[in-house]
Image (tube, rainbow, N blue to C red):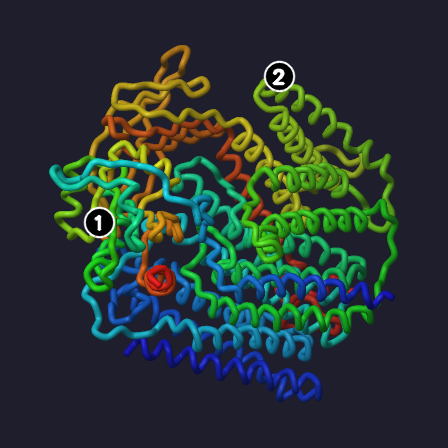
């Protein structure tokens, strides 16, 4: 009964989406206030109905209703409650339902918080959003019904992939989806602006918080996925350049570029058509990612059980949404008038460079991901593009970006003075030189590239701190104490930028250490054996069998000591689990973490001679990866709480609205 | 002139979408791995029988008769257990001649596997150290090969055989080879 309600709610949502997409769009064209006013309540109803549908599916999972095909295939009554719930979105149909629910959520948020958006822009935005929702709902209702019943119903389900039974992965997809799908509202804003033929500073200020919100979730989702891969897959890697990882990384790069170019539109009323294009491309990458994961055109560890029919449907959606909006772009964008002029050496110039580099980075990832597909279509040859390609193309672009970022963030608007900026970065340059020297003494022998990476991280960190400080204390006439006071009072957006840029520096430091300074030993051993890894000795003390709630584990205990002094450092427990229902195996690495890095031990397969394959690693600075990611998210959140960016705060012509007092403080144009 | 510039994103997108469409409509499985041994003679090998006293399994058994299916399995391999009902169906309902190679296994464990799940194989070779499997180019069990009457490998599947593979690939191929 509940499942039928869920299915019925889906159909109802499609009807609401149809109304929400057609009526306000016609209303906006005719300037008919009543028709435009349909959009907001429709968006709220849409979200309510889809929320109900989603809740119905969660209910079916929680109660282990094995009369629903989707639950049979992806759940098991013995599973812990958290993973019953997360099983809801751990499969094709359920994750699509989450997709459309998040689409509707963003529409509802704009409806609720965009009270002082111009009526026609709001109506058109919500209409475009509903069109996307309608497309996905049709897809679900026609090809992927999550509420399909099975008769006769079995008494037990066939489990979720045990690799996915992990807290890191329970929350990774919803985060990622909020990010991915959140970009849809930015896309809708862009398409609405193209239809209106008007992009101005106010538009950019409305769009930026939504981009920021989506970006924060996307960042958190990607970081969670990387963290999960690190400790669950048992290979000690945190990023594999897998097609599906790339599918989430490309929208991230485009959204990052969009965040920055929207600032230029907001402050200087220029780069308009480029910003619109980025908004389309960012969501386009999200849709392409969805297509790649579900259509089965690429080989990936992440792919859902794929089906060509579904692939064709998503491809159609992709062509209509992205092809349609790009056609609209080609038609309307040339009429968008540019505003303020600027010199190449200026804040605007620096942000253009940022955009060019981020776009180039996204393009390299795109080409690397799809090249195997292109080649196979053209020649029938099968190849795979691996990390060496990405390291050789992506890394240098990021290197240039980091160096330029240190200088660019210092630039004033309109016209800058390069030598003046360089002078103000003297302290940062000295700090960088010292850190480069220290890193070279410690690590040059092991990896010159790691030393360069650490130098880049030091530079960015120092330049970011210097930028914040000089903004608070622009001249020596202000006392140091006053400088601190002024620094605390700087707008949240300034702090957000500083924290995020500092996070990038920390992240780069972690990447340099974790990927280039890792020491590893892979060997076969039995209890009593010990192995040297860098400066450490790993001794396998015992292997025992331990029962879990729905699995049987073999647990290896490792004692880690200092290789020279013999001092005891840590005890690690690495497990290999075999799940009762499906018989699949997973590894749980034993990890000991501190700021200096991780000790990481994996108990692998037993060999024929009563030994086990052991993978032992020393991975320097890994926690910096997670700290850097957290700083990025924190920076985004700080910026989001800035008064000026409060959702819906600005108005277009300065006509004041008593419900939004914040707007009068900052003239929009 | 400026207009052309604005059309560029659309043009690029359509090219990419075109590739997607071609790849999708070709119906190819991107996970299928082409085998270097396809349409080449099966390797030479001679394996002792899994059960003492039974006949062994060697490359001579692949020549002269009709087409046969060779399946490489192991008692420790979970997907092998999953595909076993399909193999039983092939032998019992479809009347296909199946030979098995027990790969990197202990004799009693492999016998236990067959005793528990049933024996679809006409001959079972025992390849305890995996030497013969190297010549077959095995890199994951289960693997399934179709060998024609002349001892040539005509089909290879890495991973468990499903009803779909049997229906779409193996049965039509055997049908064609018998003619």
Q: Earlier in the sequence, mark 2 or mark 1?
A: 2
Q: Which numbered marker is on residue A580?
A: 1
In terms of image quadrants, where is residue A77?
Answer: bottom left
Identify the residue at horizontal 44%, vertical 82% (top origin). A12
Most distant residue in the front direction: B64
Q: Position of residue A193 (x, y in %)?
A: 71, 72
**Image height check: is A164 above or below B13?**
above
Q: Which numbered marker is on residue B52?
A: none
Give the number of callouts. Answer: 2
Q: Is residue A204 left or right of residue A88?
A: right
Identify the residue at horizontal 21%, vertical 44% (top origin). B124
What secondary structure is marked by label 2?
helix
Identify the residue at horizontal 56%, vertical 68% (top origin). A315
Q: Position of residue A654 (x, y in %)?
A: 76, 70
Q: CA distance from mark 2 to mark 1?
A: 52 Å
Q: Position of residue A462 (x, y in %)?
A: 68, 32
Q: Nearer the viewer, residue A309 or A398?
A: A309
Circle 2 crowding by C-alpha within 10 Å: few under 14, some 14–19, many from 20: few
What secondary structure is marked by label 1?
loop
Q: Is residue A32 left or right of residue A157?
A: right
Circle 1 crowding by C-alpha within 10 Å: few under 14, some 14–19, many from 20: some
Q: Position of residue A111 (x, y in %)?
A: 57, 74
């Amino acid at each position: 009964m509940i499942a039928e309600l869920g299915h019925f709610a889906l159909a109802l949502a499609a009807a609401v989406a149809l109304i929400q997409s057609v009526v306000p769009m016609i209303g906006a064209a005719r300037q008919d206030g009543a028709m435009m006013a349909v959009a907001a309540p429709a968006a709220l109803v849409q979200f309510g109905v889809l929320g109900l549908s989603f809740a119905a599916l969660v209910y079916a999972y929680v109660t282990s209703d094995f009369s629903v095909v989707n639950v049979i295939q992806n759940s098991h009554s013995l599973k812990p409650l958290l993973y019953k719930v997360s099983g809801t979105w751990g499969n094709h149909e359920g994750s699509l339902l989450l997709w459309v629910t998040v689409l509707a959520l963003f529409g509802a948020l704009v409806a609720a918080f965009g009270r002082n958006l111009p009526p026609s822009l709001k109506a058109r935005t919500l209409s475009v959003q509903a069109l996307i929702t309608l497309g996905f709902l049709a897809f679900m209702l026609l090809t992927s019904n999550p509420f399909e019943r099975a008769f006769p119903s079995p008494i037990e389900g066939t489990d979720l992939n045990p690799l996915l039974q992990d807290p890191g992965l329970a929350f990774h997809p919803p985060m990622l989806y909020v990010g991915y799908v959140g970009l849809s509202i930015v896309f809708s804003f862009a398409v609405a602006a193209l239809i209106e033929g008007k992009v101005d500073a106010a538009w950019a200020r409305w769009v930026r918080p939504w981009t920021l919100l989506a970006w924060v979730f996307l960042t958190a989702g990607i970081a969670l996925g990387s963290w999960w891969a690190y400790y669950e897959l048992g290979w000690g890697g945190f990023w594999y350049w897998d097609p599906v990882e790339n599918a989430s990384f490309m929208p991230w790069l485009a959204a990052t570029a969009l965040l920055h170019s929207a600032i230029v539109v907001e402050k200087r009323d220029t780069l308009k058509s480029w910003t619109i294009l980025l908004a389309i491309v960012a969501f386009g990458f999200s849709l392409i990612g969805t297509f790649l994961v579900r259509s089965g055109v690429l080989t990936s560890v992440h792919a859902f059980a794929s089906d060509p029919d579904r692939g064709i449907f998503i491809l159609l959606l992709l062509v209509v949404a992205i092809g349609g909006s790009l056609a609209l772009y080609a038609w309307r964008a040339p009429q968008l008038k540019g505003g303020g002029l600027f010199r190449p050496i200026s804040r605007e110039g620096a942000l253009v460079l940022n955009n060019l580099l981020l776009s180039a980075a996204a393009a390299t990832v795109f080409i690397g991901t799809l090249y195997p597909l292109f080649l196979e279509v053209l020649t029938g040859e099968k190849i795979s593009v691996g990390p060496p390609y990405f390291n050789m193309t992506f890394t240098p672009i990021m290197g240039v970006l980091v160096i330029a970022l240190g200088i660019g963030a210092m630039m004033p608007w309109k016209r800058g003075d390069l030598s003046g900026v360089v002078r103000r970065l003297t302290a940062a340059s000295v700090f960088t030189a010292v850190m480069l020297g220290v890193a070279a003494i410690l690590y040059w022998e092991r990896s010159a590239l790691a030393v360069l990476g650490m130098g880049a991280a030091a530079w960015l960190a120092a330049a970011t701190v210097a930028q914040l400080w000089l903004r608070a204390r622009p001249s020596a006439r202000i006392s140091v104490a006053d400088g601190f006071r002024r620094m605390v009072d700087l707008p949240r957006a300034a702090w957000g930028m500083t924290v995020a840029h500092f996070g990038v520096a920390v992240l780069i430091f972690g990447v340099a250490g974790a990927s280039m300074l890792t020491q590893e030993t892979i060997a076969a051993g039995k209890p009593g054996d010990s192995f040297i890894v860098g400066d450490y000795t790993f001794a396998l003390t015992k292997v025992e069998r331990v029962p879990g709630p729905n699995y049987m584990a073999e647990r290896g205990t490792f004692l880690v000591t200092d290789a020279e002094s013999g001092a005891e450092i840590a005890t690690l427990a690495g497990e290999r689990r075999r799940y009762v229902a499906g018989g699949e195996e997973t590894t749980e690495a034993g990890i000991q973490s501190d700021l200096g890095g991780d000790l990481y031990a994996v108990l692998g397969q037993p060999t024929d001679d009563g030994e086990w394959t052991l993978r032992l690693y020393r991975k320097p600075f890994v926690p910096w990866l997670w700290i850097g990611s957290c700083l990025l998210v924190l920076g985004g959140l700080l910026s989001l709480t800035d008064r000026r960016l409060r959702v819906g705060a600005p108005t277009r012509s300065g006509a004041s609205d008593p419900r939004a007092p914040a707007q009068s403080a900052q003239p929009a144009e | 002139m400026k207009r052309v510039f604005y059309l560029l994103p659309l043009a690029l997108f359509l090219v990419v979408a075109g590739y997607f469409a071609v790849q999708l409509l070709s119906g190819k499985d991107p996970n299928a791995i082409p085998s270097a041994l396809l349409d080449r003679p099966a390797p030479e090998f001679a394996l002792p029988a899994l059960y003492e006293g039974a006949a062994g399994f060697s490359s001579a058994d692949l020549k002269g008769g009709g087409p046969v299916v060779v399946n490489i399995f192991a008692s420790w391999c979970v997907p092998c257990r999953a595909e076993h009902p399909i193999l039983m169906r092939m032998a019992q309902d479809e009347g296909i001649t199946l030979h098995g190679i027990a790969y990197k296994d202990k004799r009693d464990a492999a016998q236990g596997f067959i005793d528990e799940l049933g024996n679809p194989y006409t001959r079972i070779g025992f390849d305890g150290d995996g030497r013969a499997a190297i010549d077959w180019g095995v890199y994951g069990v289960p693997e399934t090969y179709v060998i024609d009457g002349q001892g040539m490998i005509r089909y290879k599947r890495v991973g468990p055989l499903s009803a779909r593979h049997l229906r779409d690939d193996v049965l039509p191929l055997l049908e064609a080879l018998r003619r």
